[in-house]
Amino acid sequence: MKHIATIFARDIKNITTNWAALIIILGLVALPSLYAWFNIKASWDPYGNTSGIAIAVANEDKGTTLRGTPLNLGKEIISSLKDNEKLGWQFVNKEKAMNGVKHGDYYATIVIPANFSATIATALSDNPSKAEILYYVNEKINAVSPKITSSGASGIISEVSKNFIKTANGTIFKIFNDLGIELQNQLPTIEKVKTLVFKLEKNFPELNHAVNVALEDIHKTDQLVDKVQKNLPLITDIANNGKGFASDLDTFLSKASTTAQDISPKVKQDLLLLQQTANAGQQLTAVLQDSNINPDVVTSTLDHVSKRITQGIKVQETLIPWFERLNKITGDRIGFVPTKLKQFRDKLTQQLSLVNNINVAIKNGEQPAQDLIDKLNQVSGEASDILTDILNRYDGEIQPAIISGIQKAEQTAKKAQTVLNHAVQSLPDVKKVLSDASKGLTVGSKGVNEIKKELLEVEAKITALAKRMREFQSEGSLQEVIDLLKNNFELESQFFAEPVILKENQLYPIPNYGSAMSPFFSTLSLWVGATLLVSLITTEVHTEDHTYRSYQVYFGRFLTFLTLALLQSALVTSGDIFILKAYVVNKGLFILLGLVNSAVFMLMVYTLVSVFGNVGKALAIVLLVLQLAGSGGTFPIQTTPAFFQAIHPFLPFTYGISMMREAVGGTIPDIVTSDLLMMCIFVVVTLLVGLALKKPINRLSAGLVKKAKESQLIH
């Protein structure tokens, strides 16, 4: 120990007493800090400064009409982009846009075709077509810019889809709503006619009794006929009202039938849009697997997906009862639909939870766990399968049931129309019977018998009419049909425009990209600093007054390197915090862990050079290169080739960066403890190599080193 201390003390004295050596040493201490600080500052907020990335937009959309409403989505896109400052939007004609992107004036060009709105509007026709927005990108200008411009193009598509779906579905569900309201308004008249028919049926036994009595007593029959004739104006009024209502009802039902035929394909279109919402989760997993995607794009996509899921869960509470009522009207023909929609709602709830967890990890600068991404993909696929099953059965089961339900209301209402027409046709017969009855009183019993015969025929007609009305009631309530059609069309259209809403929860928020990258650049600078020290300061002790053992030289000179390395670390970490103002939750722990990293790195690099000489310097550089790609400091390790994923657990950078991240974003003691344990293992292995191999390898390489120095090229 005495000799080790002697070597260390001599080194410190030589540094402090030789001004040239002191200046060089101070430079070596300061250089790693400059390396770290410049890199951290340069990457402080790269995704917040994208407004200078020029993207040309050429709008050639001529517009169209949708259900009588003018529609020009191209103009809407341009209007929204003028308020969007995330990218440098340039609004030019197509010729200038294409020429600019080819020559590098624009990073990308977006062209909105002339038939853009017209093609989208076909969604409400029998042959819907998908519209296209043309996107051209110049990928040779910059490696990252295509990812940023792609996110801008994706944002345009998302906004267009949202606005159009809201407009189209609002039109569809308003038709349902208007039909239900009109039926509701006619309901009191329908009920009134039904009551009058039943009342007339009830009075026929009294008429029959009067005719029978007339056969026995002409005088009594005369009194009864007189009584009936007094009520004839009331019966006539009832008949006239019923006839007018029957005409109005016929017109109304014709309109309802046509509307029902138009609506059925729209329901299938809405289910397809809902399936796209489920598929958004699977598409999101593809985005998460893209290592080069803009983190802001990932966050924006996650926000959008979460919003759609949340809104979808809310509206499901309206959509499920709608199908349940339809199922009741159709005689339990489509009971599987509300059941599967409930299963789909549960899958949406799982998707929402998984998306929130993934978004939290990404906003904390972390890579979401692969099992979360796999689970999201699985749940999204299961949700999509549920809707696929519904859609596969739509044409054969669901669509016929929808049409059948609406047609059922039409048929039963038409039955009522037929009954009313029969009633109107029967009233002249009644009037004639009463007139004949009055005349019959004068001609005696012969006339009364003829009246009785005709009265029986009229009674049969009224009885048949009442029977048909009762059948109408037994087949289903008209109110159920009205409830089915009277939906909140605004709420329905809002759901399909944005069926999913993302609810964000940040666990370990870091305000800027530079602070998030400070663990990586700080750790990297410490290894670079250690490499600089061994490059300019010798690991051997040259003295003529004493001969030291190899382990004494090893530890004695290491203390000098360790002291300088710790000074480097203290300057790097404190500068990150107090000069750059980097965000660090636990500042003391950040500085302390930096000292630990510096000590371990210095030991490893020093040992390589102490044992292997100049070859050790090369090995230190090789390790640096491997750790740049294999430590997961920049891109998630899962995005790198298999070789780097394999060596990842064996690199000191892996655990050094992990410790520093805990101090920056928020400390979990278990992670720090595990990382420190791994660093201790690196220390033990390095010491074993240094103590066991230094003496024999130095002895074997002495001749090689001497010969190399004779070349006057290698020191």
Image: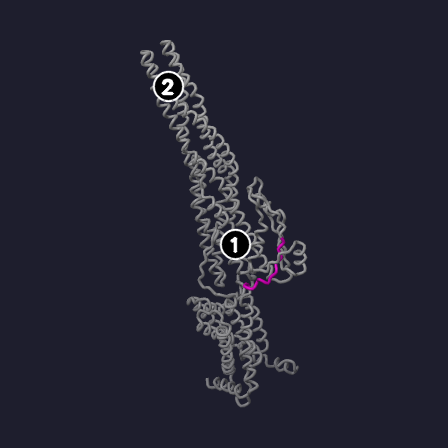
Q: Nearer the viewer, residue 366 or 471?
A: 471
In this rendering, would 104 be left or right of 656? right
Q: Nearer the viewer, residue 457 or 409?
A: 457
- How many residues crowd mark 2 within 10 Å: few (<14), some (14–19), many (20+)? some
Q: Residue at x 48, y 58 (%)?
A: 359
The percent position of residue 335, horizontal first and vertical second, equals: 43, 39
Instruction: Give the residue at the far bottom of this rendering.
Output: 545
Q: Given the image, on which type of amino acid does mark 1 rest?
A: Leu
**For the magenta stretch, what is the residue range?**
47-58
Image depth: mark 2 or mark 1 in front: 2
Task: Let me know if residue 55 is in the magenta part.
Answer: yes
User: In the rendered structure, which disc, 2 or 1, sits on the residue that comes first in sequence?
Assistant: 2
Left or right: residue 396 compared with residue 230:
right
Above or below: residue 199 compared with residue 166: above
Against 673, is 638 above or below? Answer: above
Q: Nearer the viewer, residue 518 or 206?
A: 206
Rate crowding at label 1 as few (under 14), some (14 to 19) or many (20 or more) other CA atoms within 10 Å: some
Say which quarter of the image contains residue 525: bottom right
Residue 452 shows in the view: no
Q: Amino acid at mark 2?
A: Gln
Secondary structure of residue under mark 1: helix
Q: Is residue 400 above or below residue 277?
A: above
| Residue 582, visible in the rendered structure | yes
- The residue tagged 1 is 284
SS at circle 2: helix
Residue bearing mark 2: 229
